[in-house]
Amino acid sequence: MPQDALSHAPAALPAAPPAADAPPRLGRALLRTAATLLLFLLGCGALLWFARDSEAVAAAALLSPTIIAACLALSLVNYLARGLRWILLGRAFGVAAPGGRQMLYFFAGFALTVTPGKVGEVVRLWLLHRHHGVSYTRSMPLLAGDRVLDMVAICLLALAGAALTSQYLAVTAVLTLACIALLAALTHAPLLLSLLDWAERRIRRAPGLFARAREVCATLPAIGRPAVLLPSLGLSLLGWLAECLVLWLVLQALGAAIGLGASMLVFCLAAVAGAVSLLPGGLGAADLSLLGLLRLVQVPEAAAIVTTILVRLATLWFAVGLGLMTLPFALRRPRP
């Protein structure tokens, strides 16, 4: 639930970027964001209303302003770490834009996280092209590397969580294979190119899509260099671990007897579920997965409901709020 906290878990790459000077449909996308936020808040309100006779309201009262501030601070650590990774990957791919502007564009993309078509990620590439003349051929691999590193980090953290709990051996085995496959994708571009050739021969459609995928794969070895891969992966692990700590901190405040390892496993599996669903921001899929997994590890119903709501507000919607605040500044052309 992995561009997303749960909302920013890796997913399929967006469609082709907009034309050279044509801006994405920001107005429509922002309206959809506002409507989605309203629906989310209404859903949370309905959930708490139906649970008013249970212990959910009492559980929510246990969350002090200090706990909420700590959750937001941890989420901010995640966004900053992944923003620094965005800059690092941009330099590896030869993106000629100042680091501060790249960080600004990265945050601005969060404003459109919950819109269909991955508009939030497309707008980052569009801003690089509009303000700095970075071609989409050069910036698309940056997006691909960013997504793959997110998934690698989430799988590694879930693997660590499964190991710490000494349970879920089948999950551990699957995650181990996923980590190996994703790391191989970063370091063995010829293998990916062979798989693309095989897929194109079988499908015999969308030659343009396969051509763009080949361009991306041909540049991935730039990430596979240790000088790029190791710090990028370290920043990815730091960012997603901070999000896992948000879940663990809320559960501890509510008195739920769940350790850090189980919190890591639950958060990361919910993030993967949100990404696999291909829904904008993992809406619905990530929320229900988080709630169901919390109940599966014996978290009381009231605590699970309150935790799910707060974690999604502190990760997904906090990011959207930061994006909305930074988007107007990102749209302004930088001074010469």
Image: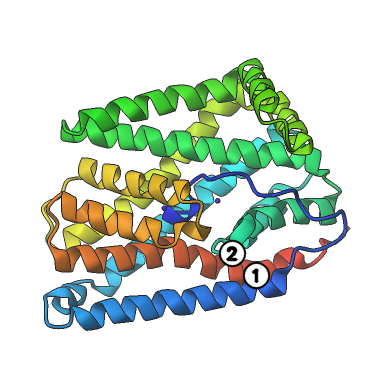
Q: CA distance from mark 2 to mark 1?
A: 6 Å
Residue 157 pos. (x, y %): 35, 37
* Left or right: where 19 falls relative to 112: right
Q: Amino acid at mark 1?
A: Ala
Q: Residues within 10 Å of mark 2 (few under 14, many from 20)?
A: many
* Left or right: where 235 falls relative to 289: right
Tag 2 residue: 115
Q: Residues within 10 Å of mark 1 (few under 14, many from 20)?
A: many
| Res. 226 image quadrant | top right
Residue 252 pos. (x, y %): 17, 58
Q: Secondary structure at mark 1?
A: helix
Q: Looking at the image, which residue is at 64% across and 62% down?
A: 108
In the image, residue 331 above or below residue 265: below
Residue 236 seen in the current view: yes
Given residues 102 and 190, the one toward you in this image is 190
Q: Looking at the image, which residue is at 56% across and 27% down?
A: 229
Q: Secondary structure at mark 2?
A: loop
Q: Which mark is residue 29?
A: 1
Given residues 150 and 216, the one toward you in this image is 216
Q: Mark 2 or 1 closer to N-term?
A: 1
Q: Amino acid at mark 2?
A: Thr
Residue 95 seen in the current view: no
